[in-house]
Amino acid sequence: MRFRTVLFTLVAIALSCIVADAAYGLFWDRALPTHTSELLVAPGSNFDRIVASLESERITRHPWLLRLLARLRGASAKIEAGRYRFRAHASTVDVLDRLLAGGRNSIRVTIPEGFTDRQIARRLASEGLGDARVFESAFKHDSANVDGARVVGLEGFLFPDTYFVPIGATPAQIEAQMLARFRQELPAHARRLARALHVSLVGAITIASMIEREAKIDRDRPLIASVIYNRLRLGMPLQIDATVEYALPHHRSTLTFADLRVKSPYNTYLHAGLPPGPIANPGRASIEAAFHPAKTDFLYYVAKGDGSHVFAATLAEQTANIARYER
């Protein structure tokens, strides 16, 4: 009889300890997360996978309690896809309540002007929206109708802006968002304006993309456009450094003489005329400059070192400018 009493007491103590530990883990242990944290729940994620992610991201250290509480509350199947933010030092109950409240169903993504399709793909992937390689392949091979012209490959036509991208959006849906913004920014009668400048619509956007990568300040953009159009008219090689950089497998902040000899149709030092297509995705100011270039006799420009450029109509003037600003 005494043995049973002792055994019962020990069991009661053990159960009390388990209950106390569980209660502490549910309500009072707020060691994690140590700072405000976010978790992306992808469409189709099951609860076990979500809990595993919470543990690996150090948002909770009581995964078994979280699973148990969710089952008791019948909440395991109620977690929707979205981006969830958890405040610092949240309890296990707080974490589950936050999951049940629902997350944001879209992600804010900013695409800077001058980003290439590859950079856009990587930015989207870094925000948890998908695989960079899948996005890059879609951008390279998909086509679109722009002002009546069919373009294959979307480099140059994905407008740089801030977007709210739905969780689980497909590459085609993201492309649609960005193409819609591009069409809004395209000047009225763009194809007619391009023809008047003796280029195609794609050619004009290619010029806009070169302007975007070359110019740092807006007042230089129409002047750089004039240099490009003047050189095209005279049959001179464009000799745009940004096109060579685009042809190289890796980014270089400074080009070498060897780089200028790279065999690529994008190398405008070796090939006259425009490159095969845009080399980046231009913003509003560069698009405007490409369709409305300044009227000048400039054929050259050189960077002054402060973000601006100085322009010249003759090789002698250009040589003097290089001596002055590239010392």
Image (cartoon, rainbow, N blue to C red):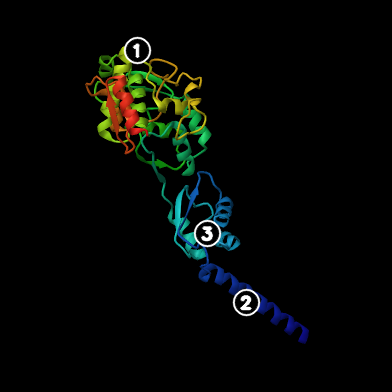
**For the residues marked 2 and 1, what is the alpha-carbon distance in whole angstroms?**
89 Å
| Of marks 3 and 2, the one in the foreground | 3
Residue 235, relative to residue 29: is it above or below? above
Q: According to the image, label 3 marks what residue?
A: 59
Residue 150's mark? Answer: none
For disc 2, the marked residue is 16
| C-beta proximity under 8 Å, tags 1 and 3 | no
Q: 34 left or right of 112?
A: right
- Crowding around mark 3 (Cα neighbors within 10 Å: few <14, some 14 to 19, many 20+) is many
Alpha carbon separation for disc pair 3 and 2: 27 Å
Question: Regarding mark 3 in the picture, which secondary structure is present there?
Answer: loop
Q: Pinpoint residue 49: horizontal percent, then vertical percent.
A: 58, 50
Q: Quadrant of the N terminus?
A: bottom right
Residue type pointed to by label 3:
Ile
Name the foreground residue: 205 vs 166: 205
The x, y position of residue 143, in whole percent, is 42, 23
Q: Residue at x 50, y 22 (%)?
A: 262
**Who is closer to the viewer here, 268 or 162?**
268
Look at the picture and state if 115 lies above or below 62: above
Q: Secondary structure at mark 2?
A: helix
- Local packing at callout 2 (Cα closer than 10 Å; few below 14, some 14-19, many 20+) is few
Q: Which mark is residue 235?
A: 1
Outermost bottom residue:
2
> Horizontally, is 188 left or right of 209 in the view?
left
Quarter location, residue 240: top left
Mark 2 vs mark 1, foreground winner is: 1
Nearer-the-camera pick, 241 or 189:
241
**Residue 166 in the image, given as x and y percentages of width and height:** 41, 41
Query: Tag 2: residue type?
Result: Ser
Q: Is residue 92 visible?
A: yes
